[in-house]
Image: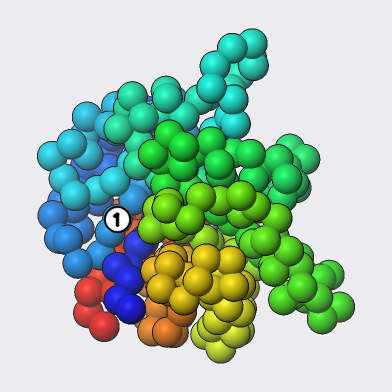
Amino acid sequence: MSRKYLIAGNWKMNKTASEAADLIREIHAAVGSQTTVQVCVCPPFTSLAAASELVEQSEIILGAQDMSPHASGAYTGEISAEMLRDLYVGFVILGHSERRQYYGETNQSVNAKVLAAVQNNLKPIYCIGETLEEREAGQTLEVVRSQVREGLENFPAASVENLVLAYEPVWAIGTGKTATDEMAQEVHADIRKVLVELFGEGPGASVRILYGGSMKPENAAGLLAQPDVDGGLIGGASLTSRAFSGIVEAVLEA
Ligand code: PGA
């Protein structure tokens, strides 16, 4: 089963709209015309409109960092799937560990967002991963398995091809500590098993599982060479074209 690599930049709360436009132009010049690796940028909501016009001329796909599970109405501060679709957003990051940690998101609340995203033809990048405490207690696989099962409850079988998972060990995010290639592969292979249980052999094998957590050009090639690592969700290194494009190039050169 061949899965196309996806390198997605999670800009988090960084860059004004004009800074975002500059960075997208640079990324476009470096890797925006190739089609071997799918490239996605996820700027803050305030930059999506400007970004949407810029990526129109390139192969870069636009992503958002969060989304409301509700369609519309009295939800102050929230952004709906329809609003994202209207700006040609293709992917939406859901259940990032920072949202779980600081905004009380749970497998159940993220599940509602994942279902709302696919119903609206947005591709969810559903994030999972264990904390350092959980890893040290030997609970990694157990934690990740229940994040996959609970977060994907009632996920429609017909939309599995639109599903992306991101395994991001919480202790590796923004810390400079990366999972070793073997550690990442062990968890990715286990996630794959759960996906096959949930959706069957073929569909389970079609889901892309990204690795996230201090991925940079220097360590990308080793991680991305693992059989079940299908791309990266990049935080810090997505904020400069040099580092982000360097990761895309690491895949192209492999
Ligand atoms: P990092 O973040 O690359 O800065 O570790 C990854 C993420 O949080 O998605």
**Disc 1 target residue:** 39
Q: Give SS at disc 1.
A: strand
From the viewer's side, name the closer residue of 232 and 158.
158
User: In the displayed structure, would residue 210 be above or below residue 101?
Assistant: below
Task: Estimate the x, y position of residue 205 in percent, counting from the top left.
Answer: 43, 74
Q: Which residue is drawn at 42% across and 84% down?
A: 227
Viewer-proximal residue, 160 or 59?
160
Residue 218 visible in this rendered orientation of the protein: no
Quarter of the image with the C terminus in it: bottom left
User: Is residue 233 depicted above or below 49 in this figure?
Assistant: below
Residue 151 as seen in the image, left or right of residue 51: right
Furthest residue in direction top, as rendered: 74
Quadrant that contains the N terminus: bottom left
Could you tell me which residue is drawn at 59 percent across and 39 percent down?
Answer: 113
- The amino acid at mark 1 is Val
Front residue (pair 136, 118):
118
On screen, residue 108 above or below 30: above
In the image, 247 versus 81, the foreground residue is 81
Relative to 129, say whether 241 is above or below.
above
Where is residue 76? Give x, y as percent. Answer: 64, 14
